Image: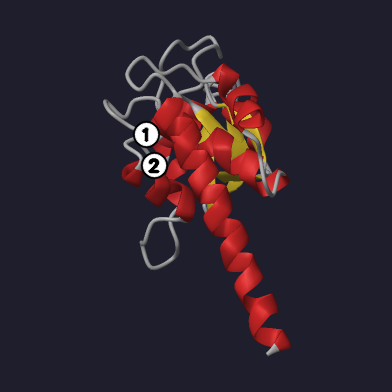
Amino acid sequence: METRTVKVVVNGTAYKREVEPRLMLGDFLRHHLYLTGTHYGCEHGVCGACTVLLEGRTARACLTLAAQVNGRSLTTVEGLAHADGTLNELQKAFTETHALQCGFCTPGMLMTLTELLNETDAPTEAEIREAITGNLCRCTGYQPIVAAALLAAQRIRDQRAVPTAQATE
């Protein structure tokens, strides 16, 4: 059996594994690294449940081969919380606005919105809706997800403003 060596940093931890060339990234994460937060929904790149951040940009783990991430860094939903285990602002906002029900789409939504919030300081509702067009949710009706993103964006802006205000005092 032919294998490829994959060296990757996932959520800040370096891994080295031998994998079959045809192994998908989602299967690599779930079955080789035991990071089960990345979900498989459609396995065609349509539903967004398998979204991860590949060097800060969203990628579909069901369409990406594990061998393609060799030498790169990834963030999965498990890597979003702070080092002490507390939830980040987006995760907190999701719980506060009831932006998750069954939770199946939640990891992909969080990853997609993380990219948006990293790139856009004050996203509009329209920008948020545009960002999540590739993520399907059958439970929430999307409004709580949009509300969570708006709330998280505001909190992140507020946190960034606090050191500036303290410095001028």
| 73 horizontally vs 28: left or right | right
Give whichever of 38, 125 is nearer the camera.
Answer: 125
Q: Which mark is residue 12?
A: none
Q: How many marks?
A: 2
Q: Which quadrant of the view contains residue 105?
A: top left
State the SS at label 2: helix
Vertical arrangement, residue 20 with respect to residue 161, above or below: above
Q: Which quadrant of the view contains residue 45?
A: top right
Q: Quadrant of the C terminus?
A: bottom right
| Tag 1–tag 2 contact (CB < 8 Å) | yes
Vertical arrangement, residue 22 with respect to residue 92, above or below: above
| Residue 75 in view of the camera | yes
Q: Which mark is residue 94?
A: 2
- Give the residue type at disc 2: Phe
Q: CA distance from mark 1 to mark 2?
A: 5 Å
Q: Position of residue 27 (x, y in %)?
A: 44, 26
- Give the residue type at disc 1: Ala
Q: Position of residue 11 (x, y in %)?
A: 52, 52
What residue would you read off at disc 1?
Answer: 99
Tag 1: Cα neighbours inside 10 Å, few (<14), some, or many (≥20)? many
| 35 horizontally vs 164: left or right | left
**Residue appearing at x 58%, y 30% in the figure:** 66
